Amino acid sequence: MITQIQTIYQQTIEFAAQRHGEQKISGNGIPYVVHLSNVCMEILFTTQETDNFDLPLAVQVALLHDVLEDTQTQEDELLKRFGRQVTSGVKALTKNDVLPKEERMLDSLRRIKQQPKEVWAVKLADRITNLQPPPLHWNQAKIIQYRDEAQVIYDELKDGNAYLAERLKSEISKYAITIVR
Ligand code: NI
């Protein structure tokens, strides 16, 4: 029997919520699980606009995308519970902290591009979600840097999903307006 997507969502978000525990979204103090759920919400709309989209894979990777980077969760635990495909997707989305900071994103993007398109989609959805108006304490240079980084993500991953690429493009152009505040 194929597990229904609603069940997959509930089981995965519970695991992620427990692991992220008290973590908050940087800048606004909202529980981190809201970020995970927002990324997954983008994925649920995307599946309606995308042919041959592996929704169970995309939902799980969306909800788990920061669990290796931000929590104590180990790779082999993820492997046992969610399987190889989900685990390698999450790994690709995890920055390698051995590398110098400025190389980490491009390295991750390179690894994402070796993954199925659903993993590209999660990265696009992640950045769309993060392009809300920036925290008030960010200065202009930081905002511009974040916008430019989003542009790199767009350039590298736009072929992964047409619907999300279009959404990211539009969020980037709206975000630029906040720079002149
Ligand atoms: Ni994220």
Image (cartoon, rainbow, N blue to C red):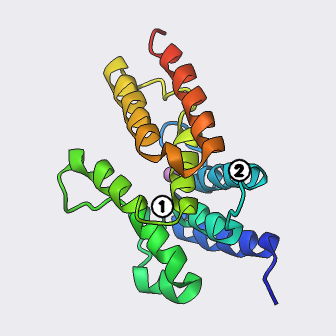
Query: In the rendered structure, which disc, 1 or 2, sits on the residue that comes first in sequence?
Result: 2
* Residue 93 image offset from top left, x and y in percent: 43, 60
Find out if the beta carbon at label 1 lies less than 8 Å from the nearest ligand 1 atom. Answer: yes
Find out if the beta carbon at label 2 lies less than 8 Å from the nearest ligand 1 atom. Answer: no
At horizontal 63% and vertical 35% (from top left) the residue drawn is 167
In the foreground, 38 or 53: 53
* Residue 40 falls left or right of residue 68: right
At horizontal 43% and vertical 42% (from top left) the residue drawn is 153
Which of the two discs, 1 and 2, sits closer to the camera? 2
Q: In which image quadrant can residue 151 be found? A: top left
Mark number displayed over residue 66 = 1
Mark number displayed over residue 34 = none
* Residue 7 falls left or right of residue 61: right
Q: CA distance from mark 1 to mark 2?
A: 20 Å
In the foreground, 55 or 37: 55
Q: Is residue 111 above or below residue 50?
A: below
In the foreground, 88 or 95: 88
* Residue 40 falls left or right of residue 93: right
Q: Which residue is mark 2?
A: 46
SS category of the residue bearing label 2 = helix
At horizontal 46% and vertical 66% (from top left) the residue drawn is 115
Q: Residues within 10 Å of mark 1 (few under 14, many from 20)?
A: many
Instruction: Kindly identify the amino acid type of the residue bearing the numbered disc 2.
Output: Thr
In contact (CB < 8 Å): disc 1 and disc 2:
no
